[in-house]
Amino acid sequence: MWRSLASNALTLLAVVLVLAGGLVMWGKRQYTSPGPLETAICLRVEQGTNMTRLSDRLADIGAVSDATILRLGAEYTEKSHLLKAGSFLVRSGASMEEIVDIVTRGGRSTCGTELNFRIGVTRAEVELREVDPQTERYVEVLSFDPGTDAVPEAYAAYRDRTDLRFRVTLAEGVTSWQVVEELKAADFLSGTVADLPAEGSLAPDSYEVSQGADRAGLIAEMQARQTRLLEALWLDRQDGLPLDSKEEALILASIVEKETGIPEERRRVASVFVNRLRQGMRLQTDPTVIYGVTEGKGPLGRGLRQSELRRETPWNTYVIDGLPLTPIANPGRASIAAVLDPETTDYLFFVADGTGGHAFAQTLAEHNRNVARWRQIEAERAAD
């Protein structure tokens, strides 16, 4: 009898184990298989949320088929305690395993709202934008000039969100004075910048920052990036360039940056200045004269006067020989690369051609014809 009872108990135990194993396998398939989410969503995880509340919310919105399985899977993989606050892109059909990985992997938001403080050559702009989960592209919510525009009422609501990301973007060709002055209006930064950074020492780039980041620390990062970039490009420079130092390369790059906004022209424009330096010709470039007038403190806002073209300053390349005293702006990677690897040409002159680009010439006679065509275009535009 006892032997029969023991045999039945063992049989029952075996059945229970088989059923339990089957249940585990079913749960694992549910955890790793594609989920029911039909369209991508931006999942916002508030500070202090735990895996239980998150799993219930995911079940309520139809992102997962079973909240309990998600919780158990997170516990089994030892990820429950790794949940981070932020906004995360969850694509359609994401499995529970993928969702848990997304919200615990590194804590960095992959969608949601971003504040981008753009510093341009003529103005700054605060742009709030959100990721559209369907296209995975940013869509502008609002924008304004912090120096001249009234702050939109909606800005305050976004500004205080815990998952808001912050970014500072520098355009190519901004001056160091402009950067420091505009950063004063970035209300999500803290601290002051004691000394004006050397012209040309800041890398035009996009910088992700945290709320309350130190302005001086951000400036230091901009300088470090420009130093690394210049050193790397200097090592790959052409042989025989009339540039004796990285500083001279930076000066010439800043001139190229201010002379053309056409990417395809940079190496050609650089070739004109390199050819002039090799022949001992003055560079005769208007942006250097403008810098001598403004010293980088904002755009000139008008045309140059003849008296300014004749006035001697350390930057007026119509008057001085060779390169100006310092860079005249902060050049980007493309302009630095252009002066260290210019096109091989015989061009010595260029002038605007009316299309946004320039007409290049080898001789003064040819250049004068190009200038006459440009003057005619200017006259026709003025008449219209």
Image: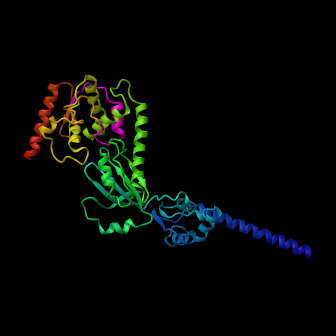
Quadrant where the N terminus lies?
Answer: bottom right
Q: In the rendered view, would you say 33 is above or below 363?
A: below
In the rendered picture of this protein, how many numbered marks are placed on residues?
0
- Furthest-bottom residue in view? 1
* Magenta stretch, main secondary structure class: loop
**Along the viewing direction, whichever of 102 and 84 lies nearer the viewer:** 84
- Furthest-front residue in view? 194
Q: Position of residue 246 (x, y in %)?
A: 38, 33
**Along the viewing direction, whichever of 28 and 105 lies nearer the viewer:** 105
Which image quarter: residue 116?
bottom left
- Which residue is depicted at the point 26% across and 65% down? 150
The answer to whether residue 255 is visible is yes
Instruction: Tell whether 66 sits left or right of 152.
Output: right
Magenta residues (range):
326-349
Q: Is residue 274 magenta?
A: no
Instruction: Tell whether 293 sits left or right of 375.
Output: right
Q: What scheme was used to colour the molecule?
A: rainbow
Q: Position of residue 9 (x, y in %)?
A: 83, 73
Q: Position of residue 122 (x, y in %)?
A: 25, 50
Which image quarter: residue 21?
bottom right
Q: Is residue 342 magenta?
A: yes
Which image quarter: residue 327?
top left
**Along the viewing direction, whichever of 55 and 338 lies nearer the viewer:** 338
Q: Position of residue 306 (x, y in %)?
A: 12, 37
The answer to whether residue 39 is visible is no
- Which residue is depicted at the point 25% across and 22% down? 279
**Along the viewing direction, whichever of 34 and 73 lies nearer the viewer:** 73
- Which residue is depicted at the point 15% across and 43% down? 303
Q: In the rendered view, would you say 100 is above or below 334?
A: below
Q: In the rendered view, would you say 224 is above or below 119?
A: above
